[in-house]
Image: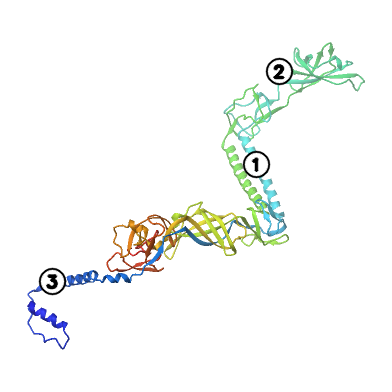
């Protein structure tokens, strides 16, 4: 049977004319059922695998010559890794000045383009109606304050003068009503008497001289002291010459102003009866009904103005305080509202800056609310812009980084900015998330709010370093060099296409086009790589015999820093 099969294969190799007629034969398959089915599947699989291996292993070696490499010399370059974005300039701060009140503008103090400072008066509006309301509110508050003070004093009676307690009229626990006397206060415990002396020259008396006093109605005498002597003698109605001498003495008892007295000073007796003057006194009375508590004063105690005498307890006095407190609070709120409303008629600058628009002037009648716009102020002390940074790059941005800013409106000039804020709230659109980064620009000569600018954040940079095209760096940090390159002497064991060698390198800063080679290459080396397109990468697997065509999805230098696919070199 083997011989018959060989004959059939030989006949198929001949031309139709040369091929002998096939012998008809009966073929009997010895396999039956499931065993037959599985055997057929196995034979098919083995045949397919063999065919693939045959094509892979028997590819002509000359096919490697079909791979086109791009070569580049290792060179010295400056490399900058940066992130860029565009944006619109905004002022450091801006404020649209409005008013909530409707009135006529009486005056304004500025013009468009002027510099103003925070708190500066900008407009004065007619506030005649508001002033009247504020005056009424002030009067109501004053009255409510008096009522509250009276209610508190009714519950907590206090001394209205300093002096001594002369009498106490009630005790703790006593029930009192409004007008009940609580205690009496006198200024001091002295009496003062002005004595007259006839036909005696004032030189006969002096301050500090002792005087013997006779009080009518009191037995015995009391001693006093001269405190003042008149400057000269005067004539009385009947023509007598009189000298006045003032004497002070301790009150010997309950002497009041209804008493009179005479005195002897030195060898002279006073003329007539002189009236006695006592210190000022005050009787403290209850101003509300209730029970007395907390009373601790005794006759003779020294008391000061404002000292609490006692506490009057009871529902009546407590209700009086509560009602007075509510009235005072309402009056205070009304007064504050009236004052705030009055303040609205004087419009001041909310920020310092430049007036960029002025929409109202003196003589205009302004309507309060959303339509009551008066002017707009920009703080131009610096400008700001917002960059939109991709989620893959935002981790490289931080506050304090330097930003280079250019504007088409200002040709040939680059401004320096600084990152002041990196937001954690991103915006997603089309499956891509970006994060706003705020940039502040202090030197703004030539720039204005609203201008479109381009900004670049320098992440890292290197000057005068060895560099190769980023596409020449493969995954694993290897580079394919020509066999005649000096660094080919340091080739790795990795199989390379004929005429080339793989060299391990240490990379540094990388931009979109070039990558720094910190070590592993030297000047005079030539690297080789397959040029890739922007939307994909078709390359030959240079390390495989014959070269295998591989398609890698994604653009850019895949093997370089930041690349996500296979390396751009022949052996990705």
State the image quarter where residue 50 is shown: bottom left
> Which is more toward the observer, 233 or 531?
531
Q: Is residue 234 left or right of residue 318?
A: right
Mark positioned earlier in the residue sequence (2 or 3): 3
Mark positioned earlier in the residue sequence (1 or 3): 3
- Per the rendering, the mark at residue 145 is 1
Work out whether 241 lies above or below 42.
above
Which residue in the protein does label 3 denote? 39
Marks 2 and 3 sit apart, C-alpha to C-alpha, by 144 Å
Total labels: the figure holds: 3
Q: Is residue 125 left or right of residue 262?
A: left
Marks 1 and 3 sit apart, C-alpha to C-alpha, by 111 Å
State the image quarter where residue 209 is shown: top right
Which residue in the protein does label 2 denote? 253
Q: Is residue 476 visible?
A: no
Q: Element type at marker 2?
A: loop
**Few, some or many residues within 10 Å of mark 1 (<14, 14–19, 20+):** some
Q: Nearer the viewer, mark 2 or mark 3?
A: 3
Work out whether 46 lies above or below 211.
below
Q: Nearer the viewer, mark 1 or mark 2?
A: 1
């Amino acid at each position: 049977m083997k011989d018959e099969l060989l004959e059939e294969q030989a006949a198929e190799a001949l031309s139709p004319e040369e091929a002998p007629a096939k012998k008809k034969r009966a073929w009997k398959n010895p396999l039956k059922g499931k065993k037959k089915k599985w055997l057929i599947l196995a034979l098919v699989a083995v045949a397919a695998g063999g065919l693939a291996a045959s094509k892979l292993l028997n590819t002509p070696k000359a096919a490697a010559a079909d791979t086109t490499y791009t070569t580049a010399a290792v060179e010295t370059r400056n490399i900058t890794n940066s992130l860029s974005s565009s944006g619109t300039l905004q002022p450091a701060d801006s404020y649209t000045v409005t008013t909530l009140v409707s009135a006529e503008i009486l005056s304004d103090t500025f013009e468009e383009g002027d510099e103003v400072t925070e708190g500066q008066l900008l407009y004065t509006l007619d506030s005649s109606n508001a002033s009247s309301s504020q005056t009424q509110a002030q009067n109501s508050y004053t009255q409510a304050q008096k009522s509250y003070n009276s209610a508190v004093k009714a519950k907590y009676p206090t001394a209205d003068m300093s002096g001594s307690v002369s009498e106490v009229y009630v005790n703790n626990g006593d029930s009192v009503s409004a007008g009940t006397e609580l205690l009496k206060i006198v200024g001091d415990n002295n009496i003062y008497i002005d004595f007259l002396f006839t036909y005696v020259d004032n030189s006969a008396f002096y301050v500090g001289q002792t005087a013997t006093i006779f009080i009518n109605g009191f037995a015995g005498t009391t001693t006093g002291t001269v405190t003042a002597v008149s400057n000269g003698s005067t004539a009385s109605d009947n023509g007598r010459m009189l000298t006045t001498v003032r004497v002070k003495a301790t009150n010997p008892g309950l002497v009041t102003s209804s008493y009179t007295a005479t005195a002897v000073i030195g060898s002279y007796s006073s003329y007539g009866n002189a009236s006695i003057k006592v210190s000022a006194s005050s009787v403290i009375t209850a101003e509300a009904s209730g029970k007395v508590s907390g009373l601790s004063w005794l006759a003779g105690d020294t008391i000061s103005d404002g000292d609490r005498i006692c506490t009057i307890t009871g529902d009546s006095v407590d209700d009086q305080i509560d009602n007075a407190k509510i009235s005072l609070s309402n009056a205070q709120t009304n007064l504050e509202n009236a004052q705030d409303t009055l303040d609205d008629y004087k419009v001041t600058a909310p920020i310092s800056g430049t007036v960029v628009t002025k929409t109202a002037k003196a003589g205009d009648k302004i309507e309060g609310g959303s339509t009551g716009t008066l002017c707009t102020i920009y703080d131009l002390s610096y400008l700001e812009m917002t960059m939109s940074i991709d989620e893959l790059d935002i981790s490289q941005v931080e506050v304090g980084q330097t930003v280079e800013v250019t504007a088409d409106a200002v040709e040939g000039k680059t401004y320096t900015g600084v990152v002041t804020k990196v937001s954690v709230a991103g915006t997603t659109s089309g499956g891509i998330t970006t994060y706003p980064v705020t940039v502040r620009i202090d030197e703004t000569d030539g720039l204005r709010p609203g201008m479109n600018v381009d900004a670049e954040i320098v992440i890292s940079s290197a000057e005068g370093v060895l560099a190769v095209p980023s596409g020449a760096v493969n995954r694993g940090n290897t580079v394919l060099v020509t066999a005649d390159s000096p660094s080919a002497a340091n080739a790795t064991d990795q199989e390379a296409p004929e005429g080339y060698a793989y060299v391990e390198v240490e990379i540094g800063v990388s931009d979109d086009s070039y990558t720094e080679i910190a070590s592993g290459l030297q000047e005079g080396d030539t690297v080789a790589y397959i040029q890739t397109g922007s939307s994909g990468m078709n390359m030959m697997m240079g390390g495989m015999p014959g070269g295998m065509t591989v398609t890698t999805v994604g653009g850019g230098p895949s093997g370089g820093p930041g690349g996500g696919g296979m390396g751009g070199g022949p052996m990705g």
